[in-house]
């Protein structure tokens, strides 16, 4: 409790503090949630809490950002609908320039994509062949593997070590032992585990330039990270590395999952090759305008991160109270254990109008819950406490 209150002192937005303090101190169950706690900061994003029902369940199953798009992004999207009979050529160039500027890289080091899903597909497609192996850990975001399969690449899966951390040494060996070219797809922080791989394990490997190897580093959740052992591969790209592509998305910290905007950062030679496989200059006009409106919105990014930090603490507190194991989350979701059947738990949560993550084999005892707003997480904590008292978890 003390640590929650201390961390909240650093939060500047009054409404967020009011909401969270109220929730944590008093309103631990549905009936006690009042509309006074329903706002996050309506000057930035119009989020409200309503008790879930079958028509509007709490969606904590897809790692979306429950805050909703920032008001600025929403307004920009609305304003641009009228212009959407045109291609957004000029605006796309503007967004690309904004991103290039923020990364202190030239324009041709940035490639816009329709979400980072397109980035994953295009980077594998452009640099892989049936002779290429995709090296991935056993438990990670599955788009890499799925796309590689359709493209006919060999998939080399490396078992994780305890608590689903990546076995980087074994991954290195897989690359060294393979005769053809390799693509290493590393998600950092990882999904579904929510954990980071320390930069000290990744950077020297990339810098050692293993022959015929491309690193695709997916940092979809990087903005939520607190652990200083994490570092983005951005600095390697800024230093001119020619063997690494960084994948980014507007779906997470910017709360724009349905808008479908992402981008790839990398050496212009790699970007040029990848560009042949993306829609690129044909992105959605409305989405591009919304992305431009929030890309440099420090206030929204801060709110998004702080709200997530509070939601994570609410979840960590209830998991600790109920003595359920969990992995240290550096993302907007937590991977935790439940006692008893996971299927049954998911079904009961669904009956309580809470949608949680799917199964992630081979981690069959583990459950992924995304972090909603603090109000949603407080409500969920109450439901979990109730389940526990009934001996269900
Ligand atoms: C690690 C990771 N990469 C990429 C994506 C895809 O995101 P986008 O919405 O940008 O396609 C996700 C979505 O959950 C993800 O978890």
Image: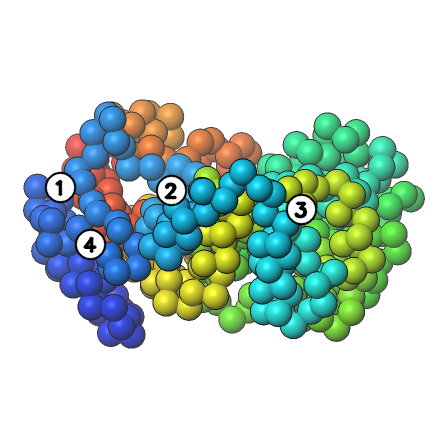
Q: Quadrant of the C terminus?
A: top left
One can see residue 318 in this view: no
* Residue 148 falls in image quadrant: top right
For the residues labelled 2 and 3, the Cα–Cα distance comes to 35 Å
Q: CA distance from mark 1 to mark 2?
A: 19 Å
Q: Is residue 141 left or right of residue 13?
A: right
Question: Decide: marks 4, 2 in contact (CB < 8 A)?
Answer: no
Q: Which residue is mark 4?
A: 39
Residue 307 at least partly seen: yes
Q: CB at mark 4 closer than 8 A to ligand 1?
A: no
For the residue pair 193 and 162, the one nearer the viewer reads as 193
Viewer-proximal residue, 70 or 286? Answer: 286
Indicate which disc residue 30 carries: 1
Closest to the camera, between mark 4 and mark 1, is 4
Q: CA distance from mark 4 to mark 2?
A: 22 Å
Residue for badge 2: 369
The reply to whether dot 1 and dot 2 touch (C-beta < 8 Å) is no
Q: Earlier in the sequence, mark 4 or mark 1?
A: 1
Query: Which is nearer the N-term, disc 1 or disc 3?
Result: 1
| Label 2 residue SS | strand
Nearer-N-terminus badge (2/3): 3
Please say if 357 is above or below 11: above
Work out how far the residue at label 3 is from the one at label 4, CA to CA, in angstroms: 38 Å
Image mark for residue 99: none
Callout 3 environment at 10 Å: few (<14), some (14 to 19), or many (20+)?
Answer: some
Question: Looking at the picture, how far across and down is residue 306, in whole percent?
Answer: 34, 63
């Amino acid at each position: 409790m003390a640590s929650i209150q201390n961390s909240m002192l650093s939060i500047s937005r009054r409404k967020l503090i009011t909401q969270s303090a109220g929730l944590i101190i008093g309103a631990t169950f549905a009936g006690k949630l009042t509309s006074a706690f329903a706002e996050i900061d309506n000057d930035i994003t119009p989020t409200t809490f309503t008790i879930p029902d079958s028509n509007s369940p709490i969606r904590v199953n897809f790692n979306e950002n429950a805050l909703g798009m920032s008001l600025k992004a929403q307004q920009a999207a609305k304003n641009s609908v009228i212009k959407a009979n045109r291609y957004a050529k000029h605006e796309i160039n503007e967004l690309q320039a904004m991103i290039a500027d923020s990364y202190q890289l030239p324009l041709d080091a940035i490639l816009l994509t329709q979400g980072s899903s397109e980035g994953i597909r295009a980077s594998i497609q452009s640099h892989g062949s049936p002779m290429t192996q995709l090296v991935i850990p056993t438990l990670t975001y599955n788009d890499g593997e799925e796309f590689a399969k359709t493209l006919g690449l060999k998939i080399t899966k490396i078992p994780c070590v305890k608590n689903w951390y990546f076995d980087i040494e074994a991954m290195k060996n897989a690359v060294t032992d393979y005769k053809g070219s390799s693509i290493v797809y590393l998600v950092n922080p990882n999904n579904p585990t929510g954990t980071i791989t320390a930069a000290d394990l990744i950077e020297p490997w990339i810098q050692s330039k293993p022959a015929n190897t491309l690193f695709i580093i997916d940092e979809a959740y990087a903005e939520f990270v607190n652990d200083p052992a994490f570092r983005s591969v951005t600095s390697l790209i800024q230093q001119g590395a020619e063997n690494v592509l960084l994948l980014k998305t507007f779906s997470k910290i910017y709360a724009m999952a349905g808008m479908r905007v992402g981008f790839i950062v990398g050496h212009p030679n790699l970007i040029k090759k990848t560009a042949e496989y993306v829609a690129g200059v044909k992105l959605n006009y409305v989405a591009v305008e919304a992305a431009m409106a929030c890309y440099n919105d420090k206030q929204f990014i801060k709110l998004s991160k702080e709200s997530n930090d509070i939601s994570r603490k609410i979840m960590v507190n209830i998991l600790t109270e109920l003595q359920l194991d969990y992995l240290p989350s550096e993302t907007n979701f937590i991977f935790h254990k439940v006692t008893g059947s996971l299927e049954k738990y998911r079904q009961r949560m669904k009956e309580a109008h809470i949608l949680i993550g799917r199964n992630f084999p081979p981690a069959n005892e583990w459950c992924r819950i995304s972090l909603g707003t603090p109000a949603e997480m407080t409500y969920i904590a109450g439901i979990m406490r109730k389940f526990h008292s009934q001996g269900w978890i």
